[in-house]
Image (cartoon, rainbow, N blue to C red):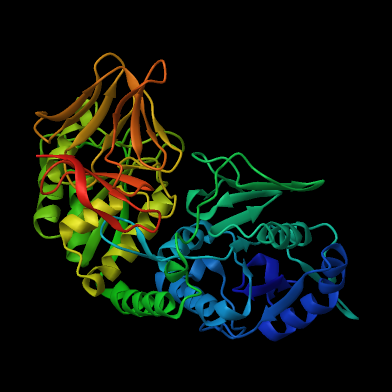
């Protein structure tokens, strides 16, 4: 297997006293000399390439991740696309301070989606980010040697080993665990277990050997013409990347934390921060609220400021400062007013992933012709596994009693009531379509609704393709079937 190691910088690539970044070429020479023999002895099929073609605006050509900017996400993604045809997988060495931001951003830069969130150009090879809490090398009079007390060697080895699983997604490896990149968060500055994933179990773990974890990997390209290996798909990805890089400067996203303050004062501090962000040219806001995304309304000043932002074309996402849990329907009176502003609930996305996703979608919007409605729908949809899917079922998935699908582009809900069965309702709550139950909706080659005894209570027409079932709410509530490649069926299963 051909694995390319791309060094962006960070602690893992520092050396000396005081610590300073190693020049890219010197790091690549030391890594090739000190790492390659051991790695190839353990993995005889491995062919390693230490790339030196990525250069940032710094004397060493690498970058402390504290200084990394959104445009640098594009540089990293661009280098991966440049080398894509020559390698079977990629390991990206990165500083830990913003590794979770880059790991969240790269999936949106290396995949291209249609307005329904289905892949038009899809990553087909593993991209694994890793780094270290201590440098990989130690300087001696004879030159660099491996830092025996550090975690860098184990992390590089584990990243290469898990890349050999060929999971077609961006992941982050640290301290024996492979996490989905856009689910990871940095949780410690002192432990070797520097990253965790509060909403998703590991994709893989390394110990005595490497084994798959509890989390289900992404499926990868649904058809050869959707894979980045295909020249047309690669062209789509490059065009999108160019558009994002050009559009980031005009689509600034700012994250604002909600903190205890006198929100009922004539000029609430959070309202002033929102207005200041708008004055600074923000086109997107990520608010990290309390609990399930609650934001105090106070005497109305915060609500007015947010409404001014939304009315001015600013896209607002509401996340939570709580590591676990989800922001969805605003249940509490303290947050119910948020739904009326048009803000998008982040679901179980981390604030880091919400920031990266909003930044990239806004920068890509003009290129794809996405309006505000399309942007909000895409933010609500799980595109690369960054959140739990709320608007669709894919092959093998089941909508059990007590579960529901929610349209990302409107208020439609498909509710599987434990007593009454399957009911499709529009945004006003009116019934559109129903199948008496109780039962479970199973997506096989086509959707079927099975009773508790396994009897078929309803089945989709046999001439419709199976693969993905999507609930849409605009312009009317409907259930649409798509084949595994994402191509839509010529008719809807249910609708007005």
Residue 392 occupies which quadrant of the picture?
A: top left
Residue situated furthest top in the rendering: 419
List x then y, in percent, for residue 425. 15, 31
Position of 225 with respect to 486 (left or right) is: right
From what the image shows, is residue 174 above or below residue 439? below
User: Considering the image in quadrants, where does the C terminus appear?
Assistant: top left
Residue 488 occupies which quadrant of the picture?
A: bottom left
Pick the residue in front: 139 or 193.
193
Position of 228 with respect to 246 (left or right) is: right
List x then y, in percent, for residue 37. 87, 72
From what the image shows, is residue 210 above or below residue 411? below
Pick the residue in front: 382 or 226.
226
List x then y, in percent, for residue 159. 69, 60
Residue 462 occupies which quadrant of the picture?
A: top left
Residue situated furthest front in the rendering: 463
List x then y, in percent, for residue 354. 36, 52
From what the image shows, is residue 173 above or below residue 59? above
Position of 21 with respect to 281 (left or right) is: right
Q: Residue at x 24, y 70 (%)?
A: 368
From what the image shows, is residue 488 above or below residue 15? above
User: Considering the image in quadrants, where does the N terminus appear?
Assistant: bottom right
Look at the image and tell me whether residue 191 can be seen: no
């Amino acid at each position: 297997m051909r694995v390319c190691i791309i060094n962006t910088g960070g602690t893992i690539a520092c050396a000396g006293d005081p610590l300073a970044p190693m020049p890219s070429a010197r790091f690549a020479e030391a890594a090739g000399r000190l790492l390659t023999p051991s790695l190839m002895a353990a993995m005889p099929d491995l062919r390693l390439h230490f790339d030196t073609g990525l250069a940032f605006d710094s004397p060493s050509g690498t970058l402390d991740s504290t200084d990394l900017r959104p445009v640098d996400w594009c540089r990293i993604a661009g280098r991966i696309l440049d080398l894509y045809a020559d390698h079977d997988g990629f390991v990206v060495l990165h500083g830990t301070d913003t590794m979770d931001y880059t790991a969240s951003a790269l999936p949106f830069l290396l995949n291209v989606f249609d307005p329904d969130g289905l892949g038009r150009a899809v990553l087909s090879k593993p991209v694994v980010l890793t780094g270290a809490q201590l440098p990989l090398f130690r300087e001696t009079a004879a030159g660099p040697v491996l830092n025996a007390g550090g975690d860098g060697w184990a992390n590089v080895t584990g990243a290469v080993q898990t890349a050999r699983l060929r999971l077609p997604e961006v992941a982050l490896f640290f301290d024996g665990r492979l996490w989905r990149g856009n689910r990871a968060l940095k949780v410690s500055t002192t432990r070797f277990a520097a990253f965790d994933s509060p909403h998703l179990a590991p994709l893989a773990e390394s110990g005595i050997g490497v084994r798959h974890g509890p989390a289900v990997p992404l499926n990868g390209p649904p058809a050869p013409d959707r894979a980045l290996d295909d020249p047309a798909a690669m062209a789509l990805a490059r065009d999108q990347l160019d558009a994002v890089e050009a559009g980031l400067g005009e689509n600034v996203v700012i994250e604002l934390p909600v903190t205890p303050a006198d929100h009922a004062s004539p000029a609430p501090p959070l309202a002033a921060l929102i207005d200041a962000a708008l004055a600074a040219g923000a086109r997107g806001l990520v608010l990290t609220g309390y609990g399930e995304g609650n934001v105090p309304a106070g005497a109305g000043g915060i609500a007015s400021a947010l409404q001014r932002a939304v009315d001015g074309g600013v896209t607002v996402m509401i996340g939570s400062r709580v590591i676990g849990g989800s922001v969805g329907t605003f249940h509490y009176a303290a947050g119910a007013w948020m739904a009326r502003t048009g803000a998008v609930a982040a679901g179980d996305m981390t604030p880091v992933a919400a920031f990266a996703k909003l930044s990239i979608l806004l920068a890509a919007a003009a290129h794809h012709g996405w309006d505000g409605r399309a942007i909000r729908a895409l933010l609500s949809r799980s595109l690369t596994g960054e959140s739990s899917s709320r608007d669709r079922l894919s092959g093998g998935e089941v909508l059990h009693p007590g579960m529901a699908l929610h349209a990302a582009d409107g208020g439609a809900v498909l509710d599987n009531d434990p007593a009454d069965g399957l009911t499709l309702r529009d945004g006003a709550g009116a019934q559109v379509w129903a199948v008496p139950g109780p039962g479970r909706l199973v997506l096989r080659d086509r959707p079927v609704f099975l009773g508790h005894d396994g009897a078929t209570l309803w089945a989709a027409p046999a001439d419709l393709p199976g693969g993905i079932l999507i609930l849409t709410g605009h312009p009317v509530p409907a259930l649409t079937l798509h084949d595994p490649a994402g191509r839509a069926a010529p008719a809807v299963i249910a609708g007005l």
